[in-house]
Amino acid sequence: MAIDCKLLYKKALGGFIEPTHTYMNQFIGTKMVEAEPMTKGAAFDAGLLRIGQIAHTQREEPGYKVVYNNGYESWSPANVFEATYKAVDGMTFGCAIQALKAGHKVARKGWNGKGMFLWLKPAATVKAEWCKDPMLKGLAEANGGEIEALGTICMFTAQKQILSGWLASQTDMLAEDWIIVSE
């Protein structure tokens, strides 16, 4: 929500005092990257830093080589990287939801069943002629031949069945053992 600085003016001695700084919108970013530890010196030698030279004392500064989804590579100081990114191994439920929205499959390490995972089935328009379910077909036909289906989280179960409309338990929501399932 944007803050209108004019509303923050304070009336003093018959006039208004403007604030000494402006308020900006806040943002939280989510992206998945690959990274490995790398010193600043090694990053310089690999051409990841766009500076003319670095002091000999800076060569051992800890950091990370970061590879983005589009293939772009950079180097980040360890303190900046560690404050920005959380390892995929052991995510919160909120991070797992963001991963689902980004098209990844997720699971909990704590689930007992083997091979279980979740994925996000996006919203779609369902046409009556596609429907094998008589109720869904009837609803689509009654709605002019198609109907909007909302997105849902689906689960592939340990019994190799698909559960549409998976609901998280409180234990799932509070867990920090969520992982991204690779293909």
Image (spheres, helix red, strand yellow):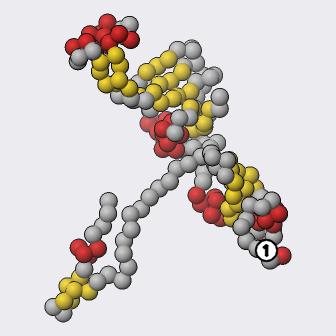
Helix, strand or loop under label 1: loop
| Residue at the spot 41% in from the left edge and 24% down from the top edge | 165
Report the number of numbered marks.
1
Give x and y (percent) for residue 109: 61, 33
Q: Is residue 163 visible?
A: yes
| Residue at the spot 63% in from the left edge and 22% down from the top edge | 114
Give x and y (percent) for residue 61: 76, 68
| Residue at the spot 58% in from the left edge and 24% down from the top edge | 116
Decide which of 20, 160 is in the foreground and name it: 20
Q: Left of 62 or right of it: where is 68?
A: left
Residue 154 vertical placement versus 62 (above, below): above
Decide which of 14, 46 is in the foreground and name it: 46
| Residue beneath disc 1 | 53
Q: Residue furthest bottom?
A: 13
Q: Residue furthest left?
A: 14
Which quadrant of the figure has residue 9?
Answer: bottom left
Which quadrant of the figure has residue 15?
Answer: bottom left
Q: Is residue 87 visible?
A: no
Point out the image quarter for the N terminus: bottom left
Q: Left of 108 or right of it: where is 73?
A: right
| Residue at the spot 74% in from the left edge and 52% down from the top edge | 36
Q: Left of 125 or right of it: where is 169?
A: right
Give x and y (percent) for residue 89: 64, 42
Give x and y (percent) for residue 169: 44, 32
Q: How packed is label 1: few (under 14 Cα within 10 Å), some, or many (20 or more)?
A: few
Which quadrant of the figure has residue 12?
Answer: bottom left
Amino acid at dot 1: Gln
Point out the image quarter for the C terminus: top right
